[in-house]
Amino acid sequence: MQVRIDTITLRKRIRHDLGDLTSLKHSLDQHGLLSPIVITSDNVLVAGHRRLEAAKQLGWNTIAVRIIDQADESDQLEMEIEENTQRKNLSTDELAEAYLRLDKIKNPGLLRRIWRAIIAFFRRLFRR
């Protein structure tokens, strides 16, 4: 569900320093919002302050949200804490492996490029 950004309100937040949003803005610009922010039914932000601020800075008018209906103030605070503590970054090895896989996809070898060209040719041939 999409909600107008200017209708979302902030209550007192745990995180005071949003940090540098440059890479997050780049990700939103390139891939869109991968995880919706979380708001209450009366549009109070529960989780996703950095994503919301990055979207604002990009000039977005609306943002994807997940609405929680029956959460009291303590539930909302617990959700905010959980979202900011229950994550695990990729290890150095996992990140290196991911970038190697991405490089192989973006820069395929000669045989793979030929194979892709053959597949594309037959797709165009049979699409008509």
Image: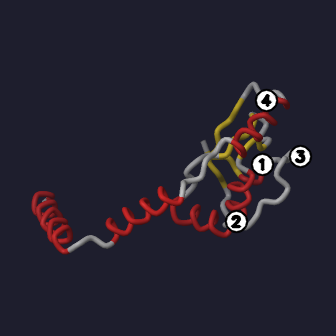
> Of callouts 2 and 4, which one flags the residue occurring earlier in the amino acid sequence?
2
Q: Which residue is mark 4?
A: 75
Q: What residue lies at 66% left-to-right and 53% top-to-bottom?
A: 62
> Of callouts 1 and 3, which one flags the residue occurring earlier in the amino acid sequence?
1
Q: What residue lies at 81% left-to-right and 36% top-to-bottom?
A: 77
Structural distance between the alpha carbons of marks 2 and 3: 20 Å
Structural distance between the alpha carbons of marks 2 and 4: 27 Å
| Residue 50 disc label | none
> Of callouts 1 and 2, which one flags the residue occurring earlier in the amino acid sequence?
1
Structural distance between the alpha carbons of marks 1 and 2: 22 Å
Label 1 vs label 4, nearer the camera: 4
Foreground residue, 38 or 16?
A: 16
The picture places residue 96, in percent across and down from the top left corner, at 46, 63
> Could you tell whether 77 is left or right of 67 in the image?
right
- In this picture, is 24 found above or below 1? below
Q: Which residue is mark 3?
A: 12
Task: Give the crowd class for mark 3: few <14, some 14-19, many >=20 residues within 10 Å.
Answer: few
Task: Give the crowd class for mark 1: few <14, some 14-19, many >=20 residues within 10 Å.
Answer: few
SS for callout 4 = helix
The picture places residue 43, in percent across and down from the top left corner, at 77, 41
> Of callouts 2 and 3, which one flags the residue occurring earlier in the amino acid sequence?
3
Residue type marked 4 = Asp
Q: Which residue is mark 1?
A: 7
Residue type marked 1 = Thr
Q: Which residue is mark 2?
A: 21
Residue type marked 2 = Leu
